[in-house]
Image: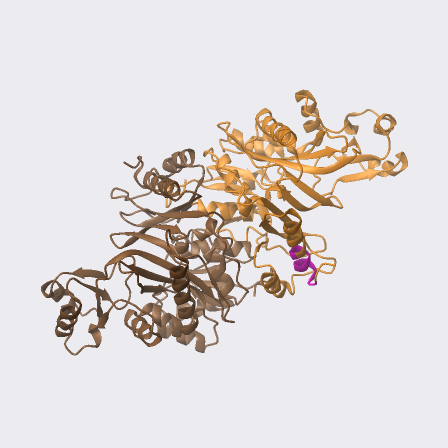
Chain colours: A orange, B brown
């Protein structure tokens, strides 16, 4: 509790854009987010008042950071689970807990749990648990057919740690690398969806409308809320999966459930994230309660806010630095022209250094006509990252 | 320009709630607001990364603060005008300028200028400029009738520096105090309105819908957007006055024009503020571009954002600390109950210490039915400040 304000102190481990935007939400709630940054130049470290620079791999750094925090939460999944256990054992309130986070950190454990719960995901096999991974992969591929998706069991994100392999030979190098892997069928999908929910320690749940996430090269480039042409039944199913998972896994805070909608009409769980997530950045302007405020409410065991949309259609487009964007030179001029051309598109820049393909911000457009709103968001994002109109 | 982000650095003198909320807006634009705080415990100083503690009365402090700022702006009108002149002469970009701010700092100068522009305000007389203030007041009162409003020419806000006096005897003590005063007719008003606009150095103007500001004891307690039952003609007139004043006075940034709507249907200018203003706090959730983002855009000479409403009715209620609220004790528990009861009302706490009557935050409700939205906002505000339901 901050004695000056009488309000709680939330500590967030990691100081990327999720912390940065959570700090914005914290300010409205009378709080000041404490962030554990890798570097003083991290996006959130540039804007938060209460910045600790330290190494989240080191328990001592985490312990020092936690002193004075009413609750500690995470902007990524990379904190060693045993450190989270140790913090909790020492009396630190952590949300989500190590038990829940385990299922966001370990893709094999998550899939195993989905199986126990009877929640569908693509067919998979844990190669790391197999006596002979090459043989296990071969048997699996014989059953579901090549190509196969290989995923690093731990540590992947934004297309990293995911490989589509067309035959056994292509998998050999990965299998030999020692990286714990699982193999997954390459599901024929119509599109990707995300069901984002929040759950408080008390057990209250809140859900935003299901969204469509548009991917390019394994990276989300666009999110459309609500997902177009999604039947109420399918939306209910997706939200039901997310709320059930949040409860069954004991998630506290925001849970993002990434889903495949298959060409034959099934919903399969792809991945989970237990933190604010790119698929819900649109909620800042697009919903009455943003995922960042909701995450704070949830980890503080405050009652959750309403998730009503503020417009019929909301589209978020990620700002991915262009191939020549090795430094932010010229971005201010682009911002100027962006504002002139799109006075109705909202900008979010993360304070990150540019390097090709890096996610350095996002824009959000709101409106009524899906095609118009999408065109506006993507054109604005393209201009900001390329300095020239979209063709 | 911040070399790490390639984006400009805005410095705001003063670290109250206006700076605090401007910092929130700055974060989205990829910036980090630099604030000059009286104390490290100021509301914005608790949440901004780039905090300088100093005295805005001291030119040296202002000069040191300005180093590295692309533009310096203000969260209050109390910076000595000659210091702003000196900063500008030294090459610092300041918005609004000393020339414009003069009219927000000096109520007599403002009224004189209104007269020159043919923009109506209540009848007034500059007692400070009179050879014999007591006689001047007496003559004025004979013309417009007692009671009379006396106003300190400089430094008043939130009802401070304003006195309604019923007869000459009651004015004697004030006249003798040496405070520069003006006298104004007590206009029979139907209500108070505010026309909030922004203007960039380039000259672009943007206007939010005219709002009604509900006052109690000279302090704004509630703002209703748009002002109910305001004809399009009257709204156009109010917005026209504000845009014209912004241009004529050379205002850069947000300009709030407080207006009286008289019982006989005239609009009279009451006061001006050249900064984000309480009458436009509702824009954070209620308009596509908030006044805080717009102020940053304007002072940076960025193109301005659209000001469309996000709901048919938006009501902001101020949180004024109750008579027993000498410290924030118990506020966290109230926040908990507030969130449970009003999941659809947005909270803004300023991180300020509580003392009776002090403005410590605000809430915003959005909806379609005026009576319902007002009831929701005021009930939530009452509960937060009193810890018990409104009766």
The quadrant of the image that shows the C terminus of chain B is top left
SS assignment for the magenta stretch, majority: helix
Which image quadrant is residue A212 in? top right
Quarter holding residue A86: top right
Q: Which residues are magenta?
A: A380-388
The answer to whether any part of residue B3 appears in the image is no
Placement of the N terminus of chain B among the 4 image quadrants: bottom right
The spot of residue B292 in percent (x, y) is 46, 57
In the image shown, does B313 or A192 lie closer to the viewer?
B313
- Give the left or right position of residue B247, taking residue B191 as reference: right
Residue B213 on the magenta segment = no
Left or right, residue A32 beside residue B143 = right
| Rendered location of residue B327, percent (x, y) | 30, 43
Residue A84 in sight in this render: yes
Question: Which residue lies at the image location 38% right of the left edge and 73% below the top edge?
Answer: B83
Q: Is residue A386 above or below residue A159?
A: below
Left/right placement of residue B249 relative to residue A354 reads left
Q: State the residue in front, B134 or A46.
A: B134
Spot occupied by residue B288 in the image (x, y as percentages of width and height): 51, 53
Percent from the top left, x then y, of residue B63?
43, 70
């Amino acid at each position: 509790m901050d004695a000056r304000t009488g309000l709680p102190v939330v500590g967030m481990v990691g100081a990327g854009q999720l912390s940065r935007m959570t700090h914005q939400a914290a300010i409205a709630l009378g709080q000041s987010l404490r962030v554990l940054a890798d570097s003083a130049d991290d996006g959130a470290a540039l804007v938060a008042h209460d910045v600790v620079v330290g190494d989240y791999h080191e328990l001592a750094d985490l312990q020092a950071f936690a002193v004075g925090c009413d609750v500690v939460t995470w902007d990524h999944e990379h904190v060693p689970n045993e450190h989270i256990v140790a913090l909790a054992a020492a009396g630190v309130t952590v949300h989500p807990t190590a038990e829940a986070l385990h299922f966001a950190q370990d893709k094999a454990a998550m899939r195993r749990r989905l199986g126990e719960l009877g929640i569908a995901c693509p067919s998979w096999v844990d190669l790391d648990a197999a006596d002979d991974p090459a043989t296990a992969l071969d048997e699996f591929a014989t059953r579901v057919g090549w190509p196969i998706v290989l995923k690093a069991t731990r540590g992947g994100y934004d297309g990293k740690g995911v490989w589509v392999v067309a035959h056994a030979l292509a998998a050999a190098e990965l299998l030999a690398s020692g990286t714990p892997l699982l193999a997954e069928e390459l599901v024929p999908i119509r599109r990707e969806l995300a069901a984002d929910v929040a759950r408080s320690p008390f057990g209250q749940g809140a859900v935003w409308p299901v969204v469509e996430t548009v991917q390019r090269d394994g990276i989300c480039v666009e999110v459309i809320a609500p997902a177009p042409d999604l039947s109420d039944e399918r939306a209910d199913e997706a939200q039901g999966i997310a709320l059930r998972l949040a409860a069954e896994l004991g998630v506290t805070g925001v849970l993002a459930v990434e889903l495949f909608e298959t060409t034959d009409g099934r919903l399969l769980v792809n991945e989970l994230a237990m933190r604010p997530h790119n698929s819900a950045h649109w909620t800042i302007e697009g919903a009455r309660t943003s995922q960042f405020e909701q995450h704070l409410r949830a980890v503080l065991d405050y009652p959750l806010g309403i998730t009503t949309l503020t417009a019929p259609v909301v589209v978020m487009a990620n700002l991915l630095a262009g191939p020549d964007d090795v430094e932010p030179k010229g971005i201010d001029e682009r911002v100027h022209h962006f504002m002139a051309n799109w006075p109705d598109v909202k900008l979010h820049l993360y304070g990150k250094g540019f390097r090709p393909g890096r996610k350095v911000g996002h824009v959000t457009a709101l409106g009524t006509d899906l095609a118009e709103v999408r065109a506006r968001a993507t054109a604005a994002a393209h201009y900001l990252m390329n300095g020239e109109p979209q063709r």
